[in-house]
Image (cartoon, rainbow, N blue to C red):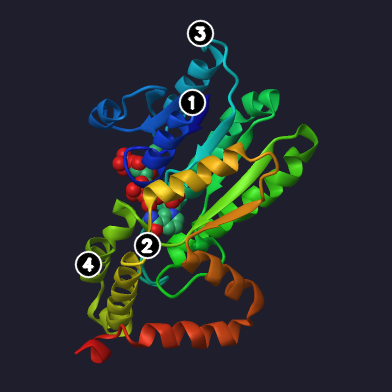
Amino acid sequence: MIVVTGTSTGIGHATAQELARRGFHVLAGVRREIDARAMSGTNLEPVMLDITSEFDIAALVTRIGEDPEKRPLRALVNNAAIEINAPVEVLPLSEWRRQFDVNLFGQVAMIQALLPALIKSRGRVVNISSIGGKGAMGVYGPYASTKFALEAVSDALRREMEPFDVKVIVVQPGAVTTPMSTQVRVKAERITSAMTAEQHGRYGELMHAMVSQAESYINKAVSAECAGQIIADAILSKRPRTRYTIGRDAAMLSILFRLLPDRLLDRIIARSLKAHYPSATK
Ligand SMILES: NC(=O)c1ccc[n+]([C@@H]2O[C@H](COP(=O)([O-])OP(=O)(O)OC[C@H]3O[C@@H](n4cnc5c(N)ncnc54)[C@H](OP(=O)(O)O)[C@@H]3O)[C@@H](O)[C@H]2O)c1
């Protein structure tokens, strides 16, 4: 059995389908009945799972422990997340907290609940981070900080689990075509419209540039199905790497973030954004 969280759309949906196709029984986390009905097929079992709900997580632990076929839990794919991009000054603390509740504490809650079963089966934890977990461009602070934290949790957990032969794998997608990446404009408009006039003066053009740049990446984005195959390969690999990037953009940025000094990175990021400012696109 494999648990995948956040399978209503995008990478989670594609990963669940791919793992089921490869013969695993997939407990596919969804939050709505309509998504449960859509997640039907051979080897696919939808489970109601909001990763911020202790009740849902406890019900999942019971489901795994009482599996009628006594199948071991082979892997947890911690995929569910939300993305809210806003300047550090602008986003209300309640929204910072909400994003951490899902993207970090929800993932940690899943790990804590399923680790005993994974230790028993020498299974795997796959944490879906982001290339934003390695470098944070302006406006990406709230989202990237949750992913930086998930990267740290993954490093610590990998070292803790080494004696128990539980592999911990981090996946860092770049742009992947999913509702998360295609709704950037709508989400940015909500943030921008809530800004004070002063904040708008400071960040309005930066928000515009961020949206324009993100939309330009979408044209070169990897499909969710391709991302699902990479994640399934990592789960099946005999000797999985500690980290996998998805997409050429993520592979390239991963090298740049690792090698270049901050000031040089600042200049490269500023130059790549320049073409997306309103003054440049007029
Ligand atoms: N797409 C990209 O370009 C990209 C790039 C880098 C990293 N990623 C990462 O890849 C992963 C998948 O993202 P995606 O692009 O496939 O996004 P997506 O299509 O928006 O899917 C996100 C999934 O998370 C679920 N979710 C949200 N809050 C939840 C909660 N509290 N409990 C349980 N499920 C919840 C959503 O369910 P509902 O439908 O019920 O809301 C949905 O199924 C995320 O970790 C994301 O950060 C994506």
What element does badge 1 sit on?
loop
Judging by the rendered image, the residue that carries numbered circle 1 is 23
The three-letter code of the residue at mark 2 reads Ala
Disc 1 packing (10 Å; few <14; some 14–19; many ≥20): few
**Quarter placement of the C terminus:** bottom left
Image coordinates for residue 113, horizontal then vertical, percent:
57, 29
Return the residue at label 4: 189
Work out how far the residue at label 3 is from the one at label 1, CA to CA, in angstroms: 17 Å
Q: Is residue 259 left or right of residue 47?
A: right
Task: Rate crowding at label 2 as few (under 14), some (14 to 19) or many (20 or more) other CA atoms within 10 Å.
Answer: many
Q: Tag 4's secondary structure? A: helix
86 left or right of 244? left
Q: Which mark is residue 181?
A: none
Amino acid tagged 1: Gly
In front: mark 4 or mark 2? 2
From the image, state whether disc 1 or disc 4 is nearer to you.
1
Q: Position of residue 4 (x, y in %)?
A: 46, 35
Residue 252: percent from the left, percent from the top? Answer: 54, 71
N-term mark: 4 or 3: 3
Q: CA distance from mark 4 to mark 2?
A: 22 Å
**Which numbered disc flags the more N-terminal residue, 2 or 3?**
3
Circle nearer the viewer, 1 or 2: 1
With respect to residue 15, does 33 lie above or below? above
Mark 1 → mark 2, Cα distance in angstroms: 28 Å
* Residue at left offset 45%, top offset 62%: 174
Q: CA distance from mark 2 to mark 3?
A: 41 Å
The answer to whether the beta carbon of the residue marked 4 is less than 8 Å from any atom of ligand 1 is no
- Closest to the camera, between mark 4 and mark 3, is 3
Residue named by callout 2: 221
CB of mark 2 near ligand 1 (< 8 Å): yes
